[in-house]
Image: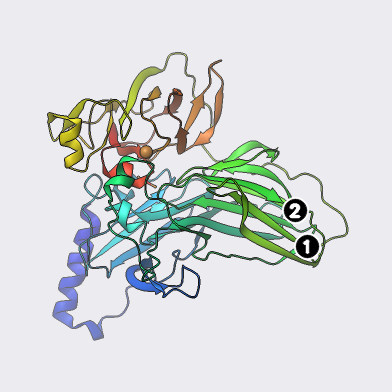
Amino acid sequence: MGPHLTRRAFCGALAGAAGLASLPVRAGSPAPLTARVTSAQIAPSKYPATEVWAYDGQLPGPVLRVPQGGRVSRRLVNELPVPTSVHWHGIRIDNAMDGVAGLTQDAVPPGETFDYDFVVPDAGTYWYHAHTNSFEQVARGLAGALIVEEAEAPDIDRDEVLLLDDWLIDPADGQFMLPFGHMMSLSHGGRLGNVIGSNGTIDLSRPARSNERLRLRLINGSNARIFVLKLDGLTGWTVALDGMPLPAPEAVTAELVLAPAQRIDLIVDVTASPSETAGLLRLDDNNLWRAQVRFPVQGAAASARREAPKALPPNPRMEPPGVKDARRLEMAMQGGAMGRMASARFNGTPHGFRDLAQRGQFWALDGQVGLGDAPFATLDRGETVTLRLTNETAFPHAMHLHGMHFRQVSGDGSLGPLRDTILSLPGEPLEIAFTADNPGKWLFHCHMLGHAASGMTTWIEVA
Ligand code: C2O
Ligand code: CU
């Protein structure tokens, strides 16, 4: 991490010598992205505002938009009372910029800064979030959308970024319910909110016109909630998953499942008539459909519907890997409440499940709780691997690989779309394949963030 710290230390020394006021702002000095404490009205207005941690004081953080092939250049300014770092989720990024405290950088102490500067090779819908104690920091609000724009925009009327989230709020005072690492949520399905919304509000409503064509960029920013969604008064196509374009748009005919950290890009036509309300609906905990986002329709954008949309232009390096001669890896996902994990390695020695539970560690990947000194696997650069995951737990998990996208291998050997996060269900083994073409140390972990913090995190190294 030399150049950035060095440059900062150098500028600091200079500022000390010359006096801050006389220093011109260095051309090309990155725009700040400031993590700080602020408040937001998340719960209904009869509750007090919630103290949140947010980028640039906005919940969610500002939508960052960059052209494909361009650079993201941001100076993280840490005004929080605790150390933090930023992970750019789904970007096939330079390892030093991946933001994983303890693996790719040191966490940035309060009052300090870190310069992130990287190229974005792929167009699509991505997001950024804290990657230091993420189970707490993301739950407190440190997340935002990162949109990488295609050189040639698809033919749409409007683009809507929808960051879906939930928050666990204490009705007594409107503040986050503590503790973030509650044993019950760590060992079960994770921290699920009692307040659910989009873009930081529980009743997001966006104006629409009939026959209007929208691109909806859905991002699941929640700690643990699996959103089950459907369209109402909208006809749509899935055009990208986890940022990566599908070879052809797929008509939305069934419910959409959006696990934590996953993204779905939809192109939708407003089929509701003026004065009706279209919507993105979610299945609630009582199996009722509720509005996640409302689209009240006023007037018409066109008198007739358009033809089906075209595919988004492909990103570079999307060729499916040949998996016949791939190196085969296997990983068991273990632990949790109602699991059958008897013991696992933790900090270099074996521990029984009860002992682990007392330390707040409930999960393991292939017998290892959390990061071991050695990576789960060391891969040669360019090598193709398959990884078979067996979910021996009683819970679903959203497994995320940093730095590279993968494809699911189905029983007949065919390959699914590129993804960076996949939902694993109990008792249903699944296999993924990828080419290890990005050198560095990459995390592989459950994106139910409490699970990640309590054991379900490992890493691989690409030499
Ligand atoms: Cu979205 Cu390891 O993170
Ligand atoms: Cu999990």
Q: Earlier in the sequence, mark 1 or mark 2?
A: 2
7 left or right, relative to 187:
left
Q: Residue 82 carries which label?
A: none
363 left or right, relative to 315:
left
Q: Position of residue 310 (x, y in %)?
A: 72, 43
Q: Which mark is residue 233?
A: 2
| Residue in front for this viewpoint, 228 or 58 | 228
In the picture, the quarter occupied by the C terminus is top left
23 left or right, relative to 40:
left
Q: Position of residue 318 (x, y in %)?
A: 53, 34
| Residue in front for this viewpoint, 86 or 384 | 86
What residue would you read off at disc 1? 276
Residue most toward the left?
Answer: 349
Residue at 53 percent across and 27 percent down: it is 320
Crowding at mark 2 (Cα within 10 Å: few <14, some 14-19, many 20+):
some
| Residue in front for this viewpoint, 211 or 340 | 340
Crowding at mark 1 (Cα within 10 Å: few <14, some 14-19, many 20+):
some
Inspect this view and state whether residue 269 appears. Answer: yes
Which amino acid type corresponds to the residue marked 1 in the rendered image?
Glu
